[in-house]
Image (cartoon, helix red, strand yellow):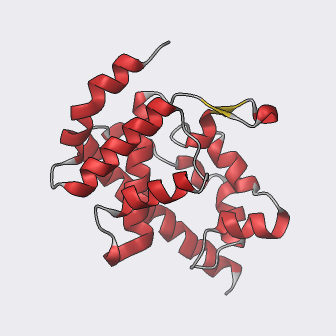
Amino acid sequence: MKYYQKLFKHFKLICKHKWFVFLASIEAGIPFRGFLHDFSKFSPIELFNSAKYYTGNRSPIDNEKNEKGYSLAWLHHRGRNPHHWEYWIDNLSSGGEALRIPYKYVVEMLCDWIGAGKAYVGKEWTRKQPFEFFIKKYNRGQIKLHLDTYSFCFVILQDYANNKKSLRYIINKYKKTYKELNIK
């Protein structure tokens, strides 16, 4: 596939992802966060690097990491988007400590997982998919979260998977508890 074809296909995928995250953000009651979500993916370092490593069946970031051992696009992205749990890891020289993610970003992260699932899984996506993704990644040690953030994500995604209530209803049910735990 030629570079300009990969660039176009990757651009379309970014837009599809942003659209589904925006819809989830509206449902969660944070439409502005959904609108702002992942604009850095259009920056030259993220867009052009990801297009270079785009295959259509795997994350360009993973492809770049396989080739180089790291991804400049990912380092740029996670450092500018506080809705990624990796943004909230400190003390890497000591194994990394997960900080508590502020409410608005943890809700955006949940919308990101829901929207990404819809964009990348497609027609096979169900409401159980985000919870299954979360549990699988966490149990494999591929997600590191502060206990408060983990607990909030767990109950939201489990509740979302097991009933037909709206995302806003479910988040609002647990919002006060998460915000009260916030020690500033």
Q: Quadrant of residue 52?
A: bottom right
Quadrant for the N terminus in the image: bottom right
Count the marks. Answer: 0
Q: Nearer the viewer, residue 115 or 50?
A: 115
Residue at figure coordinates x 61%, y 51% from the top left: 141
Q: Nearer the viewer, residue 127 or 105?
A: 127
Compared across the picture, whether 147 is left or right of 66 comes to left
For residue 151, above or below residue 24: above
Q: Nearer the viewer, residue 141 or 156?
A: 141
Residue at figure coordinates x 77%, y 69% from the top left: 66
For residue 26, above or below residue 52: above
Identity of the residue furthest to the left in this view: 164
Residue 41 placement (x, y as % from top left): 58, 54
Q: Quadrant of residue 168?
A: top left
Residue 4 placement (x, y as % from top left): 65, 77
Q: Is residue 170 visible?
A: yes
Q: Is residue 35 visible?
A: no
Residue at figure coordinates x 29%, y 29% from the top left: 175
Residue 102 placement (x, y as % from top left): 46, 27
Q: Nearer the viewer, residue 15 or 163?
A: 163
Identity of the residue furthest to the front in this view: 139
Identity of the residue furthest to the top in this view: 184
Residue 8 placement (x, y as % from top left): 56, 74
Residue at figure coordinates x 36%, y 21% from the top left: 179
